[in-house]
Image (tube, grey):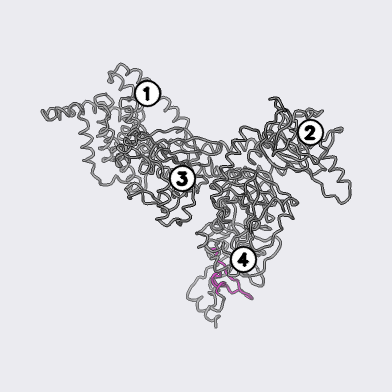
């Protein structure tokens, strides 16, 4: 059924735009970040942990003379942390630059806008907030990540740190 | 409509001209006869008028022209700059400013009318003595300025036609018309000034601030890279010369770039006379403003940042500090109050003082108001001592003013001053004596970007501790921890020279959920910190070397944690978070207790005692106690026993390529080495106290470093002869180590120079 729809769409909205995505595999899922948002890929980094930081913060890395805050994709998805060096996608969002910690970066895939589908309603709330939707590849799905949504400034520590009740995380207490 | 290059340049130049005019005007009030000042003001206005002609700003030209006429009369000595005239000129300046502003923002002059102002300026051209007879023959006197008007404006077009040469032309041309005996001399001074101004313009260059910021960042990067290179090549002697050169060039470059960003505080001080003048008129005060140290320089961004706090402080002094003249007279004071602005550089800080000789702060009133406004509870207020009560004025929402005035009293003053100054890493101190006056001290760091810091270790990470807050370091080895660190119902304390110091364990603070090693299981280093008047000890697991660190900003998420003021990259390329001592104190609940006041008093006593009696480092050498003059101690090193080498029978320490003779009369080394040979012994480290002796350095092997104490003099019984070589430490007769007795090494030894400098810095920091 969806195939028929796509066929229909293709006729209506011609021509389809092609988007280049940098693919990232984490667990069994393939994620993609539009390469236009990636400043650089830093391999084999060991971020310096920041005590008392919200848990989604993967630590700090030195990047071109600046100190970059990284966000751990594993933690965002509530996956167990992984030892050893990780790759960092240096992303640009309206709030500035930040790093996205991933297990490893794969190849660049070209996807077509006609293969896009929004987040399904049965996806859990946390993931719905993080993902933009998915692109249908031939035999799998490519989950699209939007740097704007992953920006540590916008991530809500209270929502994401439900497991922790440390008083330091709550912004209201910090302000007091 | 975007501004073209010419207009923009005109705006910048005019602003500078008006700034100069403002400075001169306030000086003119004190020296109304100063021809040089009037000449300067005239030139500023004249240049604006001349250029507006080209650019076609009619409104500006008209106003400037009216001002120029008045100034022309002043310059010729036909009028003297009395108070109404200065007021008029200040208004002229404001008028010109507002039109310039409108050109800058809207690219047009705006449609305001200046007829009132121009009328006033024309009225002022009537000489004062003419006012008296104005009633009798009004028409005649009216005609008088008319005549002069023609007279003075005649040569002007000629000057205006040569705007670039105008500056050179004006002063000599005005000479003959001055007609005063002193005129020639004045003219020469003015000429000389014009010439210096000319050469200054040739040798200076306008640089975009963003470019300077970028340069500063790049230099910061270079400093980091240098640190890394220095560490990486430390073991390779073939690179020593090169790295040393790199080190020097980097340091020079850094200093030059920092200097390029420096501006004299006169840039903001110069705004104050006007503010003081206007406010004192508005509030009915008589105030004399004194300014000192205007040439003191500060980083431009910091200068910008303290502009508002300083203005606030000045307003406060005028409104709440200095009393109205009648009140002052009644109190037996000079009806004219004095407001003093003073800037002075103290080490790596610039201190800006705003002091007045006004009423001072009535601490009882502060207590009462703070309770009234619900800022603190009545019980708490009753316990506060004077120094703490003064701190209350910095609370948000505090004001003692009986009525809210136009100027201040809304309770948003001092807290703004404090927060703004602290934002840039500065401090605010207040000192007040009822009836005598108040002094507000703003302590501003010279620069933001690079600070000296001590690198400490905790939770298996490195952290940077700014040395500004560090007052001393105490080492508590595991075997002493059980007795040295005392617990009072869960509160860890350390007796620092007899006074209880609250302790904060960094590992427990940073990782409250994990289990940490007890203090008896590891070495404890207590960094004694002073943050906003709160003294506490921060316990860390280890110390590394002090480093000059480049402060990198943190993202908002991490800034919000509230413990870190930034991050930095260390010489070994590791990242380190910069700890903020003030926030740590706050998070850990260290507050100013009333005990601290008494403790401080005791401290002061000890200090004054120390001034009389020299302080000694009390050490234990193989079971006996000995004293080393603290003034000579450069640093205390813990070294592996295997690093001690021997030249003949003399033990030496090869330290960073320099040879240090180690004095071991107590047999500490021998004992430790004996231990080493015994299987199962753990004593692999010894402590070497590095001392300065003349221009060389010597090490003294000791078993333990016990304390620092002031020594007492001892006299031989029955005589007033002071006993040599001994001192009274903690009521025990203790031998003083004779440093000059350490024989020099049989080599060409030069343990001074850079290393000496380095260790000096470290000890400075450790104090």
Number of numbered discs on residues: 4
- In-image side of B67 versus B195 (left or right): left
Q: Which mark is residue B190?
A: 1
Which residue is under mark 2? B661
Examine the rendering and report whether any part of residue B430 can be seen: yes
Compare residues B572 and B697 and report the one nearer the observer: B697
Q: Is residue B458 above or below residue B192?
A: below
> Label 1, label 3: how many angstroms apart (C-alpha)?
35 Å
Compare residues B413 and B192 and report the one nearer the observer: B413
Q: Chain of mark 2?
A: B
Front disc: 1 or 3: 3
CB contact under 8 Å: marks 1 and 3: no
Front disc: 3 or 4: 3
- Quarter of the figure with the C terminus of chain B: top right
- In-image side of B479 versus B679 (left or right): left
Q: Residues within 10 Å of mark 2 (few under 14, many from 20)?
A: many
Q: Magenta residues, as a range?
A: A125-147
Q: Chain of mark 1?
A: B
Callouts 1 and 3 in the same chain: yes
CB contact under 8 Å: marks 4 and 2: no
Callouts 2 and 1 in the same chain: yes
Compare residues A162 and B414 and report the one nearer the observer: B414
> Label 4, label 2: how many angstroms apart (C-alpha)?
56 Å
Which residue is under mark 3? B305
Front disc: 2 or 1: 2
């Amino acid at each position: 059924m969806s195939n028929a729809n796509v066929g229909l769409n293709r006729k209506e909205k011609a021509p389809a735009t092609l988007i280049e995505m940098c693919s990232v595999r984490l667990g069994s899922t393939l994620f993609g970040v539009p390469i236009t948002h990636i400043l650089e890929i830093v391999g084999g980094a060991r971020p310096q942990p920041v005590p008392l930081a919200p848990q989604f913060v993967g630590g700090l890395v030195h990047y071109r003379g600046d100190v970059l805050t990284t966000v751990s994709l594993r933690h965002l998805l509530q996956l167990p942390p992984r030892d050893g060096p990780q790759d960092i996608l240096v992303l640009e969002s309206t709030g500035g630059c930040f790093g996205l910690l991933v297990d490893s970066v794969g190849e660049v895939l070209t996807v077509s806008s006609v293969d896009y589908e929004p987040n399904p309603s049965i996806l859990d709330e946390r993931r719905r907030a993080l993902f933009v939707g998915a692109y249908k590849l031939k035999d799998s799905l490519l989950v699209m990540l939007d740097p704007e949504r992953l920006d540590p400034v916008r991530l809500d520590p209270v929502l994401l740190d439900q497991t922790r009740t440390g008083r330091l995380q709550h912004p209201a207490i910090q302000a007091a | 409509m975007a501004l073209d290059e010419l207009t923009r340049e005109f705006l910048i130049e005019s602003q500078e001209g008006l700034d100069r005019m403002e400075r001169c005007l306030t000086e003119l009030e004190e020296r109304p006869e100063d021809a040089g000042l009037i000449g300067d003001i005239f030139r500023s206005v004249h240049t604006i008028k001349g250029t507006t002609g080209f650019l076609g700003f009619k409104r500006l030209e008209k106003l400037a022209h009216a001002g120029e006429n008045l100034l022309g009369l002043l310059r010729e000595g036909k009028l003297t700059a009395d108070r109404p005239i200065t007021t008029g000129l200040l208004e002229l300046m404001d008028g010109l400013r507002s039109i310039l502003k409108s050109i800058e923002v809207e690219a047009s002059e705006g449609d305001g009318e200046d007829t009132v102002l121009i009328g006033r300026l024309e009225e002022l051209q009537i000489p004062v003595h003419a006012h008296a007879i104005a009633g009798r023959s009004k028409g005649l006197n009216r005609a008088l300025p008319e005549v002069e008007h023609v007279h003075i404006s005649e040569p002007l077009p000629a000057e205006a036609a040569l705007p670039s040469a105008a500056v050179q032309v004006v002063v000599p041309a005005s000479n003959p018309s001055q007609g005063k005996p002193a005129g020639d001399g004045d003219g020469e001074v003015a000429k000389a000034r014009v010439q210096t101004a000319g050469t200054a313009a040739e040798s200076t260059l306008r640089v975009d601030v963003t470019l300077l910021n970028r340069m500063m960042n790049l230099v910061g990067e270079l400093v980091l890279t240098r640190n890394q290179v220095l560490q990486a090549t430390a073991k390779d002697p073939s690179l020593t010369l090169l790295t040393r050169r790199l080190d020097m060039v980097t340091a020079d470059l850094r200093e030059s770039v920092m200097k390029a960003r420096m501006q004299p505080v006169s840039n903001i001080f110069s705004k104050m006379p006007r503010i003081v003048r206007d406010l004192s008129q508005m509030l009915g005060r008589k105030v004399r403003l004194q300014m000192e140290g205007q040439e003191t320089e500060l980083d431009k961004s910091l200068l910008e940042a303290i502009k508002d706090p300083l203005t606030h402080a000045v307003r406060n002094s005028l409104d709440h500090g200095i009393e109205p003249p009648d009140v002052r007279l009644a109190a037996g004071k000079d009806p004219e109050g004095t407001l003093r602005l003073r800037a002075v550089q103290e080490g790596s800080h610039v201190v800006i003082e705003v002091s007045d000789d006004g009423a001072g702060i009535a601490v009882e009133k502060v207590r009462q108001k703070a309770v009234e406004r619900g800022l603190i509870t009545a019980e708490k207020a009753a316990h506060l001592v004077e120094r703490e009560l003064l701190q209350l004025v910095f609370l948000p929402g505090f004001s003692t003013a009986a009525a809210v005035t136009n100027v201040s009293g809304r309770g948003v003053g001092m807290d703004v001053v404090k927060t703004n100054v602290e934002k840039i890493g500065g401090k605010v101190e207040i000192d007040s004596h009822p009836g005598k006056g108040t002094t507000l001290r703003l302590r501003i760091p010279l620069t933001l970007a690079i600070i000296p810091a001590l690198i400490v270790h905790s939770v298996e990470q490195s952290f940077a501790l700014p040395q500004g807050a560090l007052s001393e370091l105490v080492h508590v080895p595991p075997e002493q921890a059980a007795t040295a660190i005392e617990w009072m119902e869960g509160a860890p304390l350390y007796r620092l020279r007899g006074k209880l110091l609250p302790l904060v364990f960094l590992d427990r603070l940073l990782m409250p959920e994990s289990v940490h090693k007890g203090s008896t299981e590891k070495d404890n280093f207590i960094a004694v910190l002073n943050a906003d008047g709160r003294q506490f000890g921060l316990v860390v697991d280890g110390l590394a070397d002090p480093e000059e660190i480049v402060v990198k900003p943190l993202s908002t998420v991490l800034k919000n944690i509230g413990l870190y003021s930034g991050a930095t990259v260390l010489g070994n390329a590791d990242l380190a978070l910069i700890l903020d001592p003030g926030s740590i104190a706050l998070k850990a609940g260290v507050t100013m207790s009333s005990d601290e006041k008494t403790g401080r008093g005791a401290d002061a006593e000890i200090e004054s005692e120390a001034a009389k009696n020299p302080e000694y480092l009390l050490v234990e050498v193989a079971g006996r106690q000995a004293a080393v003059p603290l003034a000579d101690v450069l640093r205390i090193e813990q070294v592996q026993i295997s690093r001690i080498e021997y030249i003949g029978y003399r033990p030496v320490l090869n330290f960073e390529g320099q040879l240090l003779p180690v004095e071991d009369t107590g047999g500490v080394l021998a004992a430790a080495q004996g231990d080493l040979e015994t299987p199962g012994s753990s004593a692999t480290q010894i402590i070497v106290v590095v001392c300065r002796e003349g221009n060389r350095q010597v090490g003294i092997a000791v078993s333990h470093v016990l304390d620092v104490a002031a020594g007492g003099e001892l006299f031989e019984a029955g005589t007033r002869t002071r006993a040599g070589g001994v001192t009274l430490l903690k009521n025990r007769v203790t031998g003083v180590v004779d440093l000059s007795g350490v024989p020099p090494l049989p080599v060409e030894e030069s343990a001074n120079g850079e290393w000496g400098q380095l260790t000096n810095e470290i000890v400075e920091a450790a104090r």
